[in-house]
Image (cartoon, helix red, strand yellow):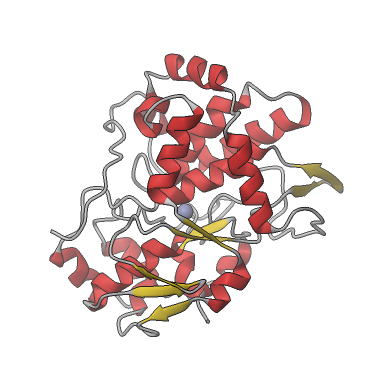
Amino acid sequence: MKFYRFVLFLGVAAALSACSNKGDSGGDSGPSPKQLVAMDLESLKSVDEDAIDDYDRSARGLFSRIYGGTSATAIRNYLDARIRYYLSQEELQALVVSPSHFTNDRWMSDGSNVFGAEMGAANIGTALWLSGLVDGVPVSVTHAGQIINVDSARTGLMLIGPGYRYTLNVRGQTVVLPSAYREGILLHEARHSDCTGGITQDDLSVLRSSRSMRETDRRFQAKACGHLHTYCPLGHEYEGLLACDDHPWGPYAVQYIFVRALASSYSGVDRAVMDANAADLLSRLRFNTADMLNGRLGEPDMTNGGLH
Ligand SMILES: [Zn+2]
């Protein structure tokens, strides 16, 4: 199915750390995307809980507020509540969506080359759920013979993108990425499954009348519903891409907290990758990040609402 442009407004999930080249997709011989996710979920079971505890204490308990605790179990519960299906690109192609076409689709259309950055993953469940609300129609998908009703932001259908990588080329050297780098991408995508604050008919009217993603970015007030990204500004590394956040505690922020908490449990090249990743994520937050971290912009609201 032709679905790519459709999912991209939720899609560019910090696949690039500051040490990588844009669009660098050098030979990646390693596990398949599905195997890689399975490996990362397994590795998450033995995550360094002491490092997380230390960070949590130094950061006003922000990690616990977001993930519901500092244990591997808490993180897995956060993830499982929000992502239930991990789809490869082949599985996305085979996905049957009903309806097959949405009448109002201009609100998320984007003429620019959004592949300027490599997509790590995309939360297609949330994109479909919002599209159904905008069109006022029920949405379902058939995946591996199973019919899934897309009736909440928490449906949890995630596409594993080309940026969900085992290795990265850094100045000609192939670096095996730490699993926490990719786990951060999963936790990022999971945050898109929260419709924080809910969405109103007035908000949906804005989307129906919007003629482009640019216009949606300017006019849509409920971006915390699905935690939609905003365009990165001129001069930014991801200038013109939907790869920044304009509200606190969105996907890049929760991903940052995870990466920051675990950085200290790595050393050498892995530590450098984690630190670069954390700096990259912070650069995508288009507001005062110190004020977010110290609570002046409010504490993380991890609830999920719907149409009200
Ligand atoms: Zn995202």
- Up the image or down, 96 lies above or below 183; here it is below
Q: Is residue 106 visible?
A: yes
- Up the image or down, 42 lies above or below 294; here it is below
Q: Residue, x 28% and y 52% (percent of image)?
A: 195
User: Camera-side residue: 191 or 143?
Assistant: 143
Assign the C terminus to one quadrant of the image.
Answer: bottom left
Q: Residue, x 66% and y 43% (percent of image)?
A: 18
Specify the quadrant of the image occupied by residue 269.
Answer: top right
User: Camera-side residue: 178 or 223?
Assistant: 178
Q: Position of residue 128 (x, y in %)?
A: 37, 69
Q: Position of residue 203 (x, y in %)?
A: 19, 64
| Number of numbered discs overlaid on the protein picture | 0
Q: Is residue 16 visible?
A: no
Q: Position of residue 189 (x, y in %)?
A: 47, 51
Q: Position of residue 77 (x, y in %)?
A: 42, 38
User: Camera-side residue: 205 or 153?
Assistant: 153
Q: Residue, x 54% and y 21% (percent of image)?
A: 49
Judged from this view, the residue extending furthest toward the front is: 145
Query: Quick check: 147 left or right of 43?
Result: left
Query: Quick check: 17 left or right of 108?
Result: right
- Up the image or down, 94 lies above or below 121; here it is below
- Up the image or down, 268 lies above or below 30; here it is above
Query: Quick check: 184 left or right of 216?
Result: right
Q: Residue, x 86% and y 48% (percent of image)?
A: 172
User: Camera-side residue: 220 or 259?
Assistant: 259
Query: Quick check: 39 left or right of 283?
Result: right
Judged from this view, the residue extending furthest toward the right is: 172
